[in-house]
């Protein structure tokens, strides 16, 4: 997605953001976006780990018992 924007597109986006939010608010905005992405990745990782644990439990119960 971002790879199709290119360097000139990113520069334009940064200039527009600087004009809209100003130089004082831009670092705060960047920090907020970074924290949001961090929380999203953490939640995604936790959900993935929960799914892996459930799959392992399901495989253990499906294994045939040797009699």
Image (cartoon, rainbow, N blue to C red):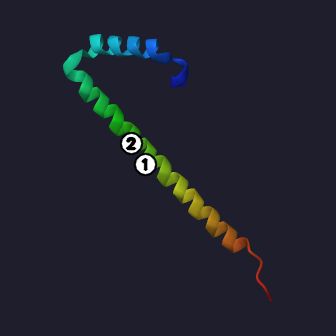
Q: Nearer the viewer, residue 41 or 9?
A: 9
- Tell me whether the residue at label 2 lies in contact with that at label 1, contact meaning CB atoms closer than 8 angstroms: yes
Q: Position of residue 59 (x, y in %)?
A: 69, 68
Rendered residue at 74%/74% (across/down) = 63
- Neighbor class of circle 2 (other Cα within 10 Å; few <14, some 14-19, many 20+) is few
Rendered residue at 69%/73% (across/down) = 61
Name the residue furthest right.
Answer: 67
In which quadrant will I find the N terminus? top right
SS of the residue under disc 1: helix
Which labelled disc corresponds to residue 38? 2
| 33 relative to 7, above or below | below
Which labelled disc corresponds to residue 42? 1
Rendered residue at 33%/39% (across/down) = 35
Rendered residue at 40%/38% (across/down) = 37
- Neighbor class of circle 1 (other Cα within 10 Å; few <14, some 14-19, many 20+) is few
| 52 relative to 38, above or below | below
Q: Quadrant of residue 54?
A: bottom right
């Amino acid at each position: 997605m971002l790879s199709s924007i290119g360097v000139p597109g990113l520069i334009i986006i940064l200039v527009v953001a600087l004009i809209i939010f100003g130089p004082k608010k831009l670092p705060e905005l960047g920090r907020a976006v970074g924290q949001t992405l961090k929380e999203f990745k953490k939640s995604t990782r936790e959900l993935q780990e929960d799914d892996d644990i459930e799959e392992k439990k399901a495989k253990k119960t499906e294994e045939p018992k040797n009699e």
